[in-house]
Structures are given as C-alpha cells and as structure tokens.
Image (cartoon, rainbow, N blue to C red):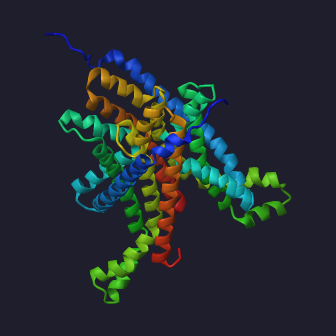
C-alpha cells in the first residue's frame, strides 16, 4: 500500500526550517542586546551603590538566576494571561529572556567596572575630569574590554537558552524541528541538523572568546 | 486584577511537590557524580598524547559545550529511538545532564590542573616525595581549591536544567508541578510554589558548598 500517515522531510521544508533558524537568531539578538544594555546600567549601579542598594538589586538578580528559565517563562505568560493582557510568544519570550540575560550581564559588567583600579579613577579626577567623564572615558572602555570574554560566554549561553522559549509557543528552531519530527517521524536526522546549526554558531564564538582570554592573560 | 489565589490546593499537594523536589535533587546529584568521573577521563584525554583519545575527548567537550541542553535531552529521548534505544524520561534527562556536566567539568578540571606550575611537581619530587604523595599533598589540594567554585556552579546549573524534564514528562519538580496544575488549573499558584522550591534548593546547595569549602580550605583563597 502506498499510503503513509507520515511524510518525509523534503526540500519543500527548507523555508519552514529557515524561518525557525531566523526566529532563533532574532530572539537571541534581541535578548542579548536588551539584556546587555540593562545589565550595563544595573551593573554600573551595583558597582557604585552602597550596601543596602546592592542588597536589594542583588537579591532580585539572584532570584532571576536561581529559578529555572522554563519556570520563569511559564510563570510570566500565565501571569500576563491572568492579568487579562496575554502577550504573544515572541514578546513574552523576549521580555523573560532579556531579564534573564540582564541578571548575568549585570554581574559581568559590575566586575568590569570594579576591575578599574581606584588609583586610575583618582588620577583621572585629578587631571580635571568630572565624575561622568571618568565613567565614560576611563572606566567604561577599560572595564568593558576586560570582561569581553565573559560577555561572549553569557551571550553564547543565551543563544542556547533561547531554545527554551519554544515552551511558550514561539516557533524557534527547536520547536520547528519538533513539529517536523512529529510529521515525518525522522527524529535523528532532523535533530542532528539542529545540533549542527547550534554548533556552527556557538563553536567559532567560543573559540574567539578563548583566544581573547588567552591574549588578555599574557 | 480579579484573580483569586487558592493556595490551599498547593498546600494539599505539598507531599507530591516534595517528591518532585526529591527527584530533582536525585537526578542532579547522580548526574554530577557520574559527570565528574567521566570528566576526569575526558580531561586526561584532552591532555593525552594519543591522538584518538584526545580527539574523542575534544569532540565530546565541544559538542556538550556548544549545543543547547534541550537539544541533548531531545536527542536522548527522541533521537536514540532511531537506534531502537528507548530511554525513560528520567534516564533521558539523566544521560543528557551527564553528557553536558562531563563536558563542562572536563574543561574545569583541565584548567585547574594546568594552573599548577610543573615546577611544583619537580620540587616535591626533589624533596623525596613519591608520585602518590606529590598528588595527595601538593597538586590535588591546590587544584580542588581552584575548581570547587566552578564545580558548585555546575551543580546548581544541573539542578536548574533538570527542570527541562517537564518537556519529556519526567516526574521531577517541574514535571510534577505541570501534572498537578493540569489537575486543578491553578497554574500560577503551582508554578510560584515550584519557583520558591527551586530557589530554596539552590540556596541550600550554595550554603552547604560554602560550609564545605570553609572547612576544607580553612578560609583562605
């Protein structure tokens, strides 16, 4: 009998897969950009503020880092639904993923700002720079360069974690492949393809990060 | 907001949630232990002169580090089916976590090992120590001091990532929460409870790790 319930994967699926790939890249880039900007601001305030301010910000970031991303995604979408304003998966996913990224980026940037030695700041001030001038011309460029390898590390983990946004229905690469699998019943081939895609994006970046790190140690 | 919280549903399901939390701890501790053993071999492999061994270790480490955890779990759960291997949800999540933990820890171990100068080895030898003594009293104590922090992080990561079990129907904390909320439709309450439990578990693990490191390393470094 030439009848089958399942249709194998064919070239006509290329568009579908490509859309999944683009969606993965799209949400990762949004989360990395927004998360880095927020993380930069929060990290700066963490490096600057006193004990109490730090404790409040720190515990909020700590919660974001100690609760699994998947639970955060489900909680946020359910919460918005209960509030009567359900968001589409992309918006909800971007918000949660960005905040999650921010929690890690804030620590990275905080370390960067603190890595600029006090004597250097004092030297800058004594040259007649204002406080904000030392922030923009001395601490930001030097501090950020020092943490570039860690920044790459966090960005890479965000690309990988973006796969979890599939839980709330965003059609990123892994969810796309999941649907193809349930249609074609060829899990191995499809999953290997997905794995290769993530590897191709992640591996060169991780090599670059390692090289930068080595260069800085020397 | 006209939503009424019904916490008594969650309170009644408390024993099931605790069971779930226990499975979460169980799978992460086990995956960590097995991961450590494999990681030692991978770290040795990466530094070894045998091409095949180092090539194998390198491939394992890079695949584990450069693909999403969810992909590994799907691979174990759906992908292996193509070879006629059908894993239970628990075992699929477990083996995925072992695979990743081994990959990350291997790099940690290698880094810790490389950070100890070779001169210390020859210095201890010249003091008359034998191979075992060199490792026992000089190399390993310093190494553990350097890697205990990344190891703790990896453990916390395993706990958090075991939550992906929800997607393959495992009965750990998230999966259990998912099952319970589908019975009562109190989604928000149950997932808030799960979030609190995860938070407490990670805090507890960090607390214990801190205590252990203080005892072992007497506070310095």
Q: Is residue B36 above or below residue B73?
A: below
| Residue plotted at (27% across, 35% down) | B79
Q: Is residue B13 visible?
A: yes
Q: Measuring from the top left, give residue A75's x and y in whole percent.
A: 54, 37
Of residues B32 and A214, which is closer to you in this image? B32
Residue A193 appears left or right of B147: left
| Residue plotted at (63% across, 25% down) | A85
Of residues A189 and B218, which is closer to you in this image? B218
| Residue plotted at (36% across, 32% down) | A194
Of residues B174 and B217, which is closer to you in this image? B174
Residue A154 appears left or right of A116: left
Q: Is residue A47 above or below residue B2?
A: below
| Residue plotted at (35% across, 52% down) | B27
Residue A5 appears left or right of A63: left
Looking at the rendered image, the quarter that the N terminus of chain A falls into is: top left
Q: Measuring from the top left, give residue B196's x and y in whole percent.
A: 53, 49
Q: Measuring from the top left, give residue B128's x and y in whole percent.
A: 31, 89
Please tell me in which quadrant of the rendered image residue B109 appears: bottom left
Q: Measuring from the top left, give residue A31's x and y in whole percent.
A: 57, 37
């Amino acid at each position: 009998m030439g009848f089958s319930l399942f249709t194998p994967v064919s070239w006509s699926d290329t568009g579908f897969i490509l859309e999944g790939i683009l969606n993965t890249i799209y949400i990762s880039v949004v989360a990395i950009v927004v998360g880095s900007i927020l993380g930069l601001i929060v990290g700066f305030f963490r490096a600057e503020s006193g004990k109490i301010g730090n404790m409040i910000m720190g515990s909020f970031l700590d919660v974001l880092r100690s609760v699994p991303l998947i639970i955060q995604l489900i909680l946020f979408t359910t919460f918005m639904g209960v509030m009567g304003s359900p968001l589409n998966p992309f918006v909800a996913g971007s918000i949660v993923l960005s905040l999650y990224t921010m929690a890690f980026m804030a620590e990275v940037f905080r370390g960067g700002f603190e890595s600029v030695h006090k004597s250097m700041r004092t030297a800058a001030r004594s040259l007649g720079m204002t406080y904000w001038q030392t922030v923009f011309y001395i601490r930001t460029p030097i501090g950020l360069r020092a943490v570039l390898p860690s920044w790459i590390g966090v960005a890479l983990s965000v690309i990988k974690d973006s796969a979890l946004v599939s839980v709330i229905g965003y059609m990123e690469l892994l969810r796309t492949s999941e649907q193809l699998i349930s249609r074609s019943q060829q899990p191995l081939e499809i999953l290997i393809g997905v794995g290769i895609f993530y590897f191709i994006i992640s591996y060169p970046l991780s090599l670059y990060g390692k090289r930068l790190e080595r260069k800085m140690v020397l | 907001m006209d939503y009424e919280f019904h916490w008594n549903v969650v309170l009644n399901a408390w024993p099931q949630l605790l069971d779930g939390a226990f499975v979460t701890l169980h799978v992460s501790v086990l995956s960590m232990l097995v991961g450590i053993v494999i990681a030692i071999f991978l770290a040795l492999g990466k530094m070894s002169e045998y091409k095949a061994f180092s090539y194998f270790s390198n491939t394992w480490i890079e695949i584990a580090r450069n693909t999403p955890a969810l992909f590994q779990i799907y691979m174990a759960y759906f992908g292996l089916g193509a070879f006629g291997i059908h894993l239970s949800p628990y075992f699929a999540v477990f083996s995925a976590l072992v695979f990743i933990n081994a990959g990350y820890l291997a790099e940690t171990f290698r880094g810790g090992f490389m950070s100890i100068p070779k001169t210390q080895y020859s210095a201890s030898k010249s003091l008359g120590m034998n191979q075992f003594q060199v490792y026992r009293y000089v190399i390993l104590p310093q190494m553990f001091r350097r890697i205990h922090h990344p190891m703790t992080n990896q453990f916390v990561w395993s706990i958090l990532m075991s939550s992906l079990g929800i997607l393959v129907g495992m009965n750990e904390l998230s999966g259990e929460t998912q099952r319970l909320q589908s019975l009562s439709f109190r989604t928000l309450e149950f997932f808030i409870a799960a979030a609190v439990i995860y938070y407490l578990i990670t805090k507890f693990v960090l607390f214990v790790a801190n205590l252990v490191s203080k005892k072992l390393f007497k506070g310095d470094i």
